[in-house]
Image: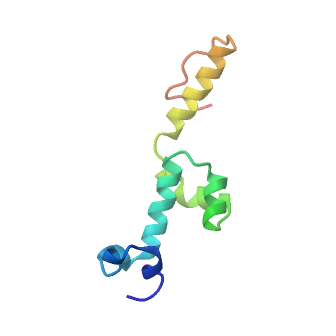
Amino acid sequence: MGGSAPYALPPARVDSPLAGRPYDLRHACITRWLNAGVPIAEVARRVGNSPEVIHRRYHGCIDGHEEAANAQITKVLEEEGDSAGNLSGRSL
């Protein structure tokens, strides 16, 4: 197999189906980084895209971020004595 597979994959994987579509690997990597909580701007910088492109293309791939953001907001509000309550399931 030609292209970048020999440089990007371990020798045992170069001829595997995994090497057949390198762009799929890029997509999987970006999705994992986003789901790990890496900020969109940092993912964009690392892959050479604008944050707008990453957000537009991968918006539907980001799981659980609304709940995590709501938990962070609730924590800060509670620490500051605000009685806004739990934000789970609500949009601001």
88 or 48, nearer to the observer:
48
Q: Position of residue 5 (x, y in %)?
A: 43, 80
27 or 66, nearer to the observer:
27
Q: In which quadrant is the C terminus drawn?
A: top right
Residue plotted at (60% across, 55% down):
55
Residue 41 relative to residue 5: left or right: right
Asked if 90 appears above or below 38 in the picture, the reply is above
Report the number of numbered marks.
0
Q: Position of residue 10 (x, y in %)?
A: 38, 73
What color scheme is it? rainbow
Asked if 17 appears above or below 59 in the picture, the reply is below
Q: Position of residue 57 (x, y in %)?
A: 55, 61
- Kindly give the residue lying farthest to the front in the view shown: 11
Asked if 14 appears above or below 87 in the picture, the reply is below
Residue plotted at (50% across, 47% down):
36
Asked if 65 appears above or below 78 in the picture, the reply is below
Residue 24 relative to residue 13: left or right: right
Q: In which quadrant is the N terminus drawn?
A: bottom left
Residue plotted at (52% across, 40% down):
65
Image quarter for residue 37? top right
Residue 38 relative to residue 29: left or right: right
